[in-house]
Amino acid sequence: MANLTTHFIGISSPNPFWLASAPPTDKATNVNRAFEAGWGGVVWKTLGEEGPPIVNVNGPRYGALLTPDRRLTGFNNIELITDRDLALNLKEITEVKRLWPDRAMVVSLMVPCNEDAWRAILPRVEDTGCDGIELNFGCPHGMSERGMGAAVGQVPEYIQMVTHWCKQYSRLPVIVKLTPNITDIRLPARAAKHGGADAVSLINTINSIMGVDPYSLTMAPSTGGKGSHGGYCGPAVKPIALNMVAEIARDPQTAGLPISGIGGVTTWRDAFDYIALGAGNVQVCTAAMVYGFKIVQEMTDGLSNYMDEMGFTSIEDFRGKAIPSVSDWKYLNLNHISKAVINQDTCIECGRCHIACEDTSHQAITFEKDGKRHFEVKEDECVGCNLCTLVCPVPDCITLRTLAPGETDMRTGKTVLASHADWTTHANNPGRVAA
């Protein structure tokens, strides 16, 4: 049977599912409940330095993007780092780690960007017996306006400097949490590596405003008539996060740098995507807040069943295996040609494929045949864009067929070459399909 145990930068946990630094990891009560439910680890909600207390809004902190049937696809928050006393947090971290020695306990930190502040807090955190620290260089709201969070994460030089301080003043493994609010995610990842980081985690939340109330004409949610941009997360950000994880995993300058994947993980399938693209574990927040802590049981069961089906005994058997398939556009094989095929036995004749193709694509699907409603692909017009497969409500009713070598494309009249290499040799032959 599959073994879900992970050993991420020397931190062991019984499965790769960790709770991310967020409201669910704010106190011992929550974290104990999470471990009882089966989570492999937690990143304790971000701690700040001792001093004036953090004050959160006493009003709406969250916003959501919902489907018509009220399923959550995107989530926004304006909550700051912990507003609980530092000493109390450290005491609870110590107690929880003692109760759950087999679970990963990482502590998120955010203090002003000066050496003394980091040098002061690190020994106190290390004394809790925690397994590692995560540097919160990603929070895009509230704290960034105070010169912390994303304000640090957007400056590679600061990332490298603070990471170096943490490696200098602590023996704990250091994970650098990266902000997605940046043009090229590889630059902060490289800076973290140069500073000595043991790993990076990504993505933190994306700067966002959820909408405007059409009656009060104020942004929503708002407190006392005003609102603020917040951090966007949930299923909707997963494709953005996966791209950034893949960019770091395949960058020669950060290749081999361990990655903790974050962003929209709701099912085992989401976790699989991150791991296949190089992540050593995943962190979850929104799914736990929406469905409760026990959702981890569905995640672990699903991933374990998949691994058993594939014959994988550990996540290392498939971790990073999809990275070679991620390429720059210029390297794509244009010698590959697909055509859509509609299964007439399962087609319900709703017409969505025809409407989408007729109005916005290549007019490659018929509407009728012999005077009757009938949907069929015209191969001489189809470019294999797969829009029809995405709008069809019937699973696998519309599929793509790959043209075999030697077959002629009815749209262009060109013959498919035997391989990508053949195209490289005959790249200037106008009678051949490009690669």
Image (spheres, rainbow, N blue to C red):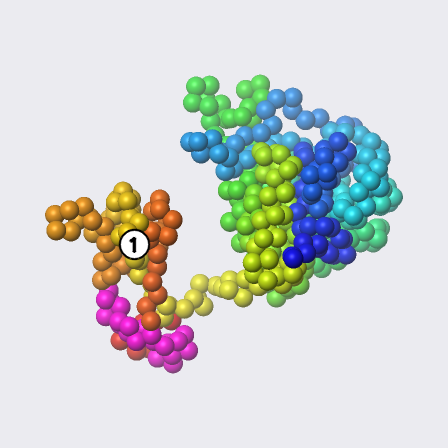
Q: Position of residue 55 (x, y in %)?
A: 71, 26
Q: Assess whether residue 95 is covered by the magenta stretch.
A: no
Residue at 24% of width from left, 61% of height from top? Answer: 379
User: Residue 315's quadrant in the figure?
Assistant: bottom right
Main SS type for the magenta part?
Answer: loop
Residue 32 falls left or right of residue 153: right
Element type where label 1 sits in the image: loop
Packing grade of label 1 (10 A; few <14, some 14-19, many >=20) is some
Figure quadrant of residue 312:
bottom right
The residue pinned by badge 1 equals 343
Q: Farthest front residue?
A: 1
Measuring from the top left, give residue 239's x and y in whole percent: 51, 49
Highlighted range, magenta: 405-427
| Quarter of the rendering occupied by the N terminus | bottom right
Q: Amino acid at mark 1?
A: Asn
247 and 287: which is toward the camera = 287
Residue 156, percent across and down? 66, 53
